[in-house]
Image (tube, helix red, strand yellow):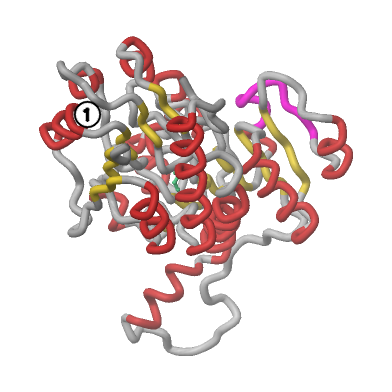
Amino acid sequence: MSKPKVLITRRWPQSVEDKLQQRYDVSLNLDDHPLTADEFKDALQNYDAVCPSVCDSLPAEVLNVANKRCKILGNFGVGYNHIDINAAQQQGLIVTNTPGVLTQSTADIAMTLLLMSARRGAEGDRLIRAKQWTGWCPTHMMSSDVTGATLGLIGFGRIAQAMARKAHHGFGMKILYVKPTPADASIVNELQAVRCESIEQLLPQSDYVSLHCPGGEQTRHLINAKRLQLMKPSAHLINTARGDVVDSKALIACLQTRQIAGAGLDVYEGEPNINPDFLSLDNVTLLPHLGSATIATRTAMGEKVLANLQAFFAGEPLPDRVV
Ligand code: DGY
């Protein structure tokens, strides 16, 4: 029997690509270029499984292509706001994702951004590279304390809870969170975490606000000009969730006028095209969507896709089915 035809849209860690090649008739994207809409349509017509990643856009007009051979989109990533899930469902396409394995690495990056923004890490690095450092002095680049400060988490799922643990146990931070339903008593007790009724209640009490909600229409511009005004002037906003959760124009205006002290961003509206106004601001730390970018995590993400494909082709229940 011939092997199923599988296309992966970007390069994956070598060990996972090797396993894919052993099991399937797989096409790799050897030059790692982002696929065009036409290449995606062609892939949907010619492969049994297509494995996109969070950088690929799969709107209805691509997914609705006629004469599809593809039955499953094995997404390399936990977030799936780049896929029109309703269209996929209507087209009878199964979608899977990779939850769980990127929790710690993404929480590490959120903590990295929090520390860099609070302690002006990127700014200091730029200063030295520009050969502008004239030496230690008592008032140079003073910044904000992290230890003992209050961290407000918007969303309190796996990644937020992992960050809260690092912040509370490692830095003695007080934890506030907003979530539609109360979190499990065990984590609340462990972290002495306090649930706020609303984002409006959380913002004025937090020294650092970290976003951990899914992307998509429901959370688009959740953090807007009105809500940014509720933050303390000394506060920092951290975003490792999705770029469009924050109204970037409103955030830029707020950073320009020092309405808040700083921001640390790993994700952007319309990434990789970043609003150029961010680039001239000293009080924003910018990372290129590095949340899950460790060798171990990216390998584990690939293994998750493999497990989903294996279950699908064996007719077994899928470990991480979205629709
Ligand atoms: C995901 O998997 O959704 C992440 O954004 C990739 O790091």
Query: Camera-side residue: 271 or 132?
Result: 271
In this rendering, is residue 122 above or below 263? below
Query: Camera-side residue: 111 or 32?
Result: 32
> What is the quadrant of the N terminus in the image?
top left
Q: Residue at x 20, y 47 (%)?
A: 34
Residue 270 pos. (x, y %): 27, 38
Query: Camera-side residue: 81 or 260?
Result: 81
Q: Seen in the image, is 299 located left or right of residue 45?
A: right
Residue 82 pos. (x, y %): 34, 31
The stretch of residues the image draws in magenta is 194-202
Residue type marked 1: Leu
Q: Residue at x 41, y 43 (%)?
A: 76
Q: Which residue is mark 1?
A: 44
Q: Residue at x 14, y 38 (%)?
A: 36
Crowding near pointer 1: few (<14 within 10 Å), some, many (20+)?
many
Residue 185 pos. (x, y %): 86, 31
